[in-house]
Amino acid sequence: MMDRWQAAKARFWVMGMPILIGVFLLILAAMGIFYFQQQRERDSLDVQLDQLRSMVASPVEISDELSAEYEENREAIPSELETDDVVEDILSIATENGFDVTTEDVTITPSDTPRNENIEGTNYQVFTFELKVSGDYRTVTDFMSDLDSTPVLKTMVIESLDIDIAADSATAQLEFGVYVLEE
């Protein structure tokens, strides 16, 4: 029995040990390749991280052109608003689009009091209006397009819109706010 054990041990050292060493070297080589691949990725990510840190650390320079555009837009926001003027402007747009403003085709109702909003540290008053227009499809869509693009109501924001289209008519109901700088 001892001879068998001695023979198996001798065979292992002759055949098994080189195989075991080969497997160990293959595992070691694979780990080295994986490490060097990870090192390249880590170096690349370190470079990107350094670039991002330098971008965050340096103040963003605002160009003179952008500053001028900001000031121009800020100055375009009115500091006062008469709801009657807004109603008059909308009725004028409706008349230009073929609505008879003396009928129920166009109704506009301003809110009683404006609400206050703070946006990016600037205080605004928002005057809310409800508007309903009824007519044929083309007239209603033309009116909506003209209303959206009118320079008179630069600070108008449509808050809700509901359009019903039938075979021979269309109705648009919308609620919008006109923003004014709070004094």
Image (cartoon, rainbow, N blue to C red):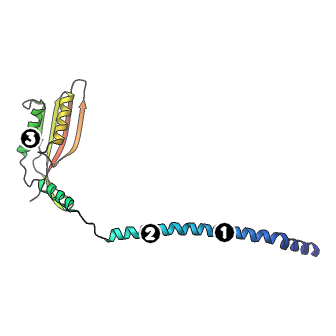
The amino acid type, in three-letter code, at marker 2 is: Val
Disc 1: which residue: 29
The image position of residue 174, as x and y in percent, is: 19, 40
Give me the residue at 20% from left, 32% from top.
171
- Relative horizontal placement of residue 54, taking residue 126 as reference (left or right): right
The answer for how far apart the CA atoms under marks 2 and 1 are is 27 Å
The answer for how far apart the CA atoms under marks 3 and 2 are is 57 Å
The image position of residue 6, as x and y in percent, is: 90, 75
Give me the residue at 19% from left, 37% from top.
144
Label 2 sits on a secondary structure element that is helix
Disc 2: which residue: 47
The amino acid type, in three-letter code, at marker 3 is: Asp
Q: Would you say the residues marked 1 and 3 are in contact, meaning their CB atoms lie under 8 Å apart? A: no
The amino acid type, in three-letter code, at marker 1 is: Ala
Q: Residues within 10 Å of mark 2 (few under 14, many from 20)?
A: few
| Count of residue discs | 3
For discs 3 and 2, the disc positioned in front in the rendered view: 2
Label 3 sits on a secondary structure element that is helix
Task: Give the farthest residue toward the top.
Answer: 168
Disc 3: which residue: 89
Q: Quadrant of the N terminus?
A: bottom right
Q: Residues within 10 Å of mark 1 (few under 14, many from 20)?
A: few
The image position of residue 168, as x and y in percent, is: 22, 23
